[in-house]
Amino acid sequence: MDIQKLFAQKLIKDTAVCDFIKDQQNLILAMGVAMPPRLIKAVERALESGQLNTINLYYMHGSEVLSQTLLKPALADKVCPRPLFMSSHDRAALKSLPQSSLMEFVPATFHQVGRLLTEQVEPHCFMVTVSPMDKHGYFSLGTNADYGASVIRKAHKIIVEVNENMPRTFGECSVHISEIDGIIENDTPLIEIPPRLPSPTDAKIAALIAEYINDGDTLQMGVGGIPSAVLGLLKNHKNLGLHSELFCPAMVDLIRSGVINGKHKQWMQHKHIFTLALGDKEMYEFMDDNPSIVGYPASWVNNPVIIQKNNNMVSVNAAIEVDLSGQINAEQIAGQPFSGTGGQLDFVRGAYASKGGRSFIALNSTVKHGAISRIVPRLQGGAVTDTRMDTQYVVTEYGCVNLKGLSLPQRAQALINIAHPDFRESLAQEARELGFIAS
């Protein structure tokens, strides 16, 4: 059949969206930029009108539209949200929900999410924003291969929101119209997260990390001001590679200038690997039809076995707190989910397993204008993102320490040495009370 006729046949009205998902079934939404706003609003209306009564909602990194629709208090008795990674919009929505309502957070390291959402969770319906169809009948997942590239192959029903602003990317991002059950169109601007200027403290930490990055290294940079600041310091480096969970605006200039070219990668040479992209319009336009930028599912990109295939892999990620044994919490504050497990541990392990590889956990030494130390005797958040056995370099504005091979007393002392000076004496006292340091 002619693909244009097939496209026309699969175009649906918003009111028909509820025909693809039944009560008490699992609806999986694509994450971040690929979270489809028009489809989300159609589900909202179906719930409000009684066409649909209850759903289980699985997703990562919720959008503003999601927080204003399916996560609003009026639908708290009809939607059971089960995020695997929370955004600022999710946290705001959680605060607004009745106390009897909960977001049922699902812990999962990123490279396992695709499997969890297709094996442990029955994928009844998947909704995602895609690029326009090409002449061969293929859409592109664009900015978000992540778990979408896995779920879209196995979901019972698939509805796509076609948006001309979604870039067409290569790798494992292509989806044929024959695999799609329903189509709607919506050329709304994509979510943009403008680059954040690093604080003076971020800049100090970034400078310490940049000293450890050599020509020819392959990079993974996490979310936040510090990883972006590190990239900004690499303009005079040569022949860097990219195998990163996140593709961000700071990477664009380095690719354009030839600093990141993948020349010395052992795996996927000359290709810039990502699984999700989050940035601004200029970055999305740079990605569009760019054959050097290839997206693959997180089950592959974030798999430590794959990560280690490139020598000299460097991983840079942020944290909320680190305890004196080297345990890292990057996902909870005061016992409440702040973000999620994500892919940090995937790259901490993969980078260290790489020949010559290094992993860095970066954090400001304090928060609340210096009132609270982020180096603590015991984690306060209630979650361990990276175990003490996995942590390698920890960096604050006061220094960089390598915990590998250090005993517990040596670790405690090394971390106290890079804590804020106002807290070092109290940390030393608590370390003695915990038996980390001799009295």
Image (tube, grey):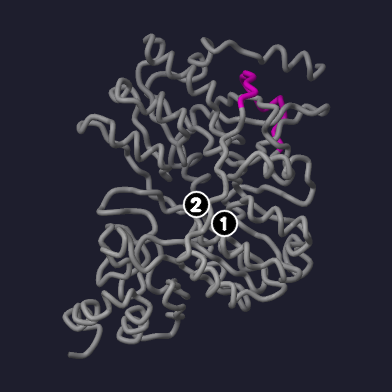
Residue type (three-letter) at the residue carrying disc 2: Phe
Task: Locate residue 76: give its quadrant.
Answer: top left
- Comparing 110 with 163, the one in front is 163
| 364 up-or-down from 223: above or below | below
Residue closest to the eye, 349 or 429 = 429
| Helix, strand or loop under label 1 | loop
Closer to the camera in the image, 326 or 116: 326
Q: Is residue 61 above or below residue 159?
A: below
The mark found on residue 302 in the picture is 1
In which image quadrant can residue 430 be found? bottom left
At a point 23% along the width and 29% down the height, the residue shown is 98
Asked whether residue 103 is drawn in magenta, I would say: no
Please provide percent x and percent y for residue 341: 42, 53
In the image, which residues are magenta? 174-188
Q: Nearer the viewer, residue 199 or 404?
A: 199
Q: Is residue 352 visible?
A: no
Whole-percent x and y of residue 187?
A: 65, 23
Q: Position of residue 35 (x, y in %)?
A: 53, 32
Quarter of the image where one finds residue 213: bottom right
Establish if 35 lies above or below 324. above
Q: Which mark is residue 139?
A: none
The percent coordinates of residue 146 (x first, y second) are 58, 45
| Residue 290 appears in view | yes
Dot 2 and dot 1 residues touching (CB under 8 Å): yes
Question: Residue drawn at (61%, 29%), measured in percent from left and top?
Answer: 189
Q: Which mark is residue 110?
A: 2
